[in-house]
Image (cartoon, rainbow, N blue to C red):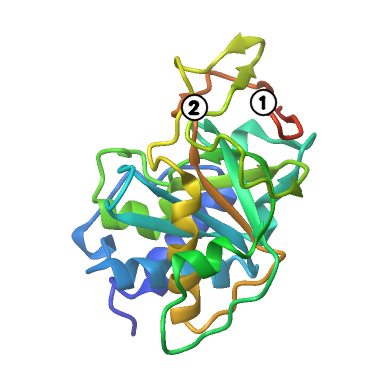
Amino acid sequence: MNHPSHPANVAQLIVDAMVAGQKLTEIVPAYVPADAASAYALQREILRLRDTTVGGWKVGSKSTSGGPINGALLPEDGLFASGSQVEYADYPSPILELEIAFRLNRAFTPRDEPYSDQEVRASIGHMGTTIEVVSSRFAAWPKIEPLLALGDLLNHGALIVGEFVPYDENFPFIEPALSFTYAGEDIVPGDGANPAGDPRRLLAWVVNHHTQNGQSVTPDLVITTGSYTGMYLTKGPGLAQGEIRGLPPIEMEMI
């Protein structure tokens, strides 16, 4: 018999909530991962139970340099192209974020020594705009244990993926010009900025974390790197339209 803290048990509750479009109202101590390694194991178990593969990563930091970085696996079945419609009811209390994502132009395979920031940055092949739908599976969020949020894919619901273009190292990553509207309302809170500063600094963490878990980072993976527009809590169905100047525009509709 599995102990209640075994990832399979908590993961099943989370996956059931995803399928039902509902939130878990009870949190018992056994649901909370013991440490970061257990939280990442919970992420992997969620994807296994969803019978899907890794489509990419979300990664972020609340510090512009030197602060903690964490991330979450993105289920491949939760990635949608720009112009897609998604069901509002599938994502309770959905929050929207406008982000920049990258694809690398080479594979990174597991090895003993970590990959350097320079090595990873030299491999950036393409970039594009994404809209993340954030929707925790826990009714008490954001007042839940950080390790539980980490295990719950960092509250990831879905990722709308815009058109990718060749990487431009001179792009103004720190503070790009952008626009983001939902249901006709401007939802950019002042100047857009990423809490991590330059999002490219997050990529080496993804490569090393993924390869140290025995998995390869391949050019098809989408690595989305944190919101330039904060977190916008939607109030009902609507059309989201975003543009980060210099990248193709993106849109999605919640119906």
Looking at the image, residue 53 lies above or below residue 127 = below
Q: Taking the image as drawn, is residue 45 in sight?
A: no
Mark 2 secondary-structure assignment: loop
**x 65%, y 75%: residue:** 107
Alpha-carbon span between mark 2 and mark 1: 10 Å
Q: Secondary structure at mark 1?
A: strand
How far across and how far down the image is residue 6, in percent? 33, 75
Dot 2 amino acid type: Thr
Kindly indicate the quadrant of the structure image that contains residue 31: bottom left
- Spot the residue most to the top: 185
Q: Which mark is residue 93?
A: none
Residue that badge 2 annotates:
229
- The image position of residue 159, as x and y in percent, is 63, 45
In contact (CB < 8 Å): disc 2 and disc 1: yes
Residue that sits furthest to the left in the current view: 29
Q: Position of residue 5 (x, y in %)?
A: 28, 71
Other residues around mark 2 within 10 Å, as few (<14) / some (14–19) / many (≥20): many
Q: Nearer the viewer, residue 59 or 10?
A: 59
Q: Nearer the viewer, residue 74 or 62?
A: 62
Q: Quadrant of the C terminus?
A: top right
Left or right position of 186 against 106: left
> Left or right of 75: which side holds 147?
left
- Label placed on residue 242: 1
